[in-house]
Amino acid sequence: MHHPGFLDVVAGLGTTHPGITLRVSEGSATELQRGIRDRSLDIALTGYAGALPPEFANQLVTDEQLHAFALSDLGLGARPRLADVQRHPVLSLPLGSGIRAAYDQSCAKLGLDPRVDIEASSPLTLLGLAERGGGIAVLPRTIETAGSLVVAPIRDATVHAKLG
């Protein structure tokens, strides 16, 4: 997933810090957090749900409620519940992402099975599937989408997707 503000900062580092050598690594939240633990990474922008383990120094960047991205003919309404979302195929990021952790933990709090019918590593792929009637993508609101999808906050998804 790309974050324009983060990319702006990284792109400008050569000017603000001449001579710096920067290696940008991408991976799942689990992989990035492991890199911080084993010191193969100095800093990571990583997704999570709930709280990070206490050994991580953290600056919260975003804290977002989960939303349903769906075709209007699915009739989800303005503030669907997770049970409403699960009446359709659920499209989600894979295990190891903060967004998936927020979905799984929100389901667990309600006693729901955190069922995922289609998993993809890119939010854009999930949106493309939703646009084609493949199901309901569960993502934060900040994900940009085409006009064909209705976006509604999932009212009982109480665990938020965080980035820090």
Image (spheres, rainbow, N blue to C red):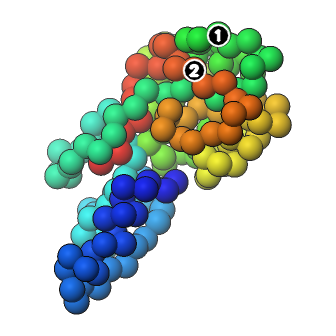
Residue lying farthest bottom?
19
Question: Would you identify the image quadrant in which residue 143 lies?
Answer: top right
Q: Secondary structure at mark 1?
A: loop
Q: Residue 99 has which mark?
A: none
The 10 Å Cα crowd at callout 1, few under 14, some 14 to 19, many 20 or more, is: few
Give the residue drawn at x 31%, y 72%: 12
Residue 66, horizontal then vertical, whole percent: 49, 28
In the foreground, 157 or 8? 8
Residue 64, horizontal then vertical, whole percent: 40, 32
Q: Is residue 131 left or right of residue 121?
A: right
Tag 2 residue: 152
Number of marks: 2
Question: The residue under label 1 is which amino acid type?
Answer: Gly
Give the residue drawn at x 64%, y 29%: 69
Q: Is residue 12 left or right of residue 76?
A: left
Give the residue drawn at x 65%, y 19%: 85
Q: Is residue 108 visible?
A: no
The 10 Å Cα crowd at callout 2, few under 14, some 14 to 19, many 20 or more, is: many
- CB under 8 Å between callouts 1 and 2? yes
Q: Is residue 26 visible?
A: yes
Question: Would you identify the image quadrant in which residue 32 lies?
Answer: bottom left
Residue 132, horizontal then vertical, whole percent: 82, 37
| Disc nearer the start of the sequence (1/2) | 1
Q: Secondary structure at mark 2?
A: strand
In the foreground, 164 or 6? 6
Question: The residue under label 2 is which amino acid type?
Answer: Ala
Tag 1 residue: 77
Residue 113, horizontal then vertical, whole percent: 59, 22
Vertical placement of residue 5 versus 105, above or below: below
Q: CA distance from mark 1 to mark 2?
A: 7 Å
In the foreground, 44 or 39? 44
Give the residue drawn at x 41%, y 19%: 158
